[in-house]
Image (cartoon, helix red, strand yellow):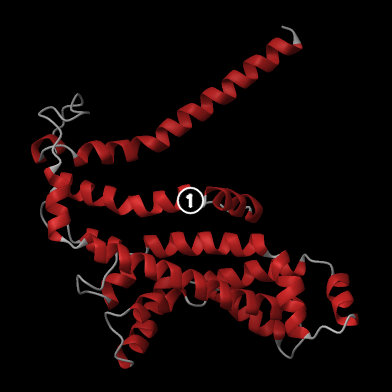
Amino acid sequence: MSWRTKKNWTSIMIHTFLVVGSAAMLLPFAWMVLTAFKTRSESISVNPFYIFPAHGWHFENFVQVWNSYNFLVLYKNTLIMIALRVLCACLTATLAGYSFGRLKFPFKNFFFALILVQMMVPGQIFIIPQYLIVSRLHMMNTQFALVLPGAVTAFGTYLCKQGYQSLPSSLEEAAELDGANIGQRFLYVMLPLTRSSLVSLGIFTALFAYKDLMWPMIVAPKTNCTTLTAALSRLQGQFTSNYPQLMAGAVMAVVPMLILYLIFQKQFVEGIATSGGKL
């Protein structure tokens, strides 16, 4: 077998593997969309040939879910929460990351170790203290309650610290020789060079905020104050569930993130690639 033939077979095998893997990842999404147009009996049928709706496409599932919940309010609450969490996380993380990565102050290593410890423990440990803070401030069913857990992120601080540490110190020294103070060095020299870290942090923060389920259910139980994920959880009953309506709600909940991905596709790919992270 010649080298060119071997290379072609290798390329075919790699592309076949990628196509099969992509189909396996898209199958649950396709099943969700198809189930949203089925009847309730079709959705729970064990007949493997009920892949497509057998008795027509039932758009009333979307209408019933839309009438049950005010999705415009849910969209607004979710998007505002995501935007505020991304803004707060990027602001606090870049300031803390610059402090730990470039400045010298007493007990710096000790405080950074506390941040690392926070990353090692489950996030559910902080639910009760955060709930007490929100409750005693009388901020239940508000955007403040939804944004509070994501306002400061240990992961973001660590990510930004690594980004600032990777920059050469000669850049900051040159700016200092030109008369720039610490604020100017941070704002005009160091911050623009860590754009990839901030993009990565913004993407991860937005995804984590969008998928957050437990916290909105605790601090925003009212329907007009909660988010998409918490509202969808109420479509699932204790003993039985209307799966077509549940899937219809899930399809409508996915739409905003698909639109955001299509708009910021370049930044999304760049942020994931430069951070080396995975979803």
Residue at 64%, 79% (x, y): give it: 95
For this view, does 217 lie left or right of residue 46?
A: right
Residue at 37%, 65% (x, y): give it: 79
Residue at 41%, 50% (x, y): give it: 259
The answer to whether residue 202 is seen in the rendering is yes
Looking at numbered disc 1 in the image, what kind of residue is underneath it? Ile
For this view, does 84 lie left or right of residue 226?
A: right
For this view, does 215 lie left or right of residue 268?
A: left
For this view, does 193 lie left or right of residue 36?
A: right
- In the picture, the quarter occupied by the N terminus is top right
Residue 110 in picture, x, y percent from top left: 67, 84
Residue 77 in picture, x, y percent from top left: 32, 69
**Residue at the extreme top:** 1
Residue at 29%, 90% (x, y): give it: 138
Q: Nearer the viewer, residue 237 or 204?
A: 204
The answer to whether 41 is drawn above or below residue 207 in the figure is: above
Q: Nearer the viewer, residue 175 or 147?
A: 175
Q: Nearer the viewer, residue 148 or 193?
A: 193
Q: Which image quarter: residue 223?
A: bottom left
Disc 1 is placed on an element classified as: helix
Residue 32 in picture, x, y percent from top left: 27, 41
Q: How many marks?
A: 1
Q: Which residue is mark 1?
A: 263
The answer to whether 2 is drawn above or below residue 59 in the figure is: above
The answer to whether 206 is drawn above or below residue 25 in the figure is: below
Q: Which image quarter: residue 2?
A: top right
The answer to whether residue 237 is seen in the rendering is no
At label 1, counting other C-alpha atoms closer than 10 Å, the crowd grade (few under 14, some 14-19, many 20 or more) is few
Residue 82 in picture, x, y percent from top left: 42, 67
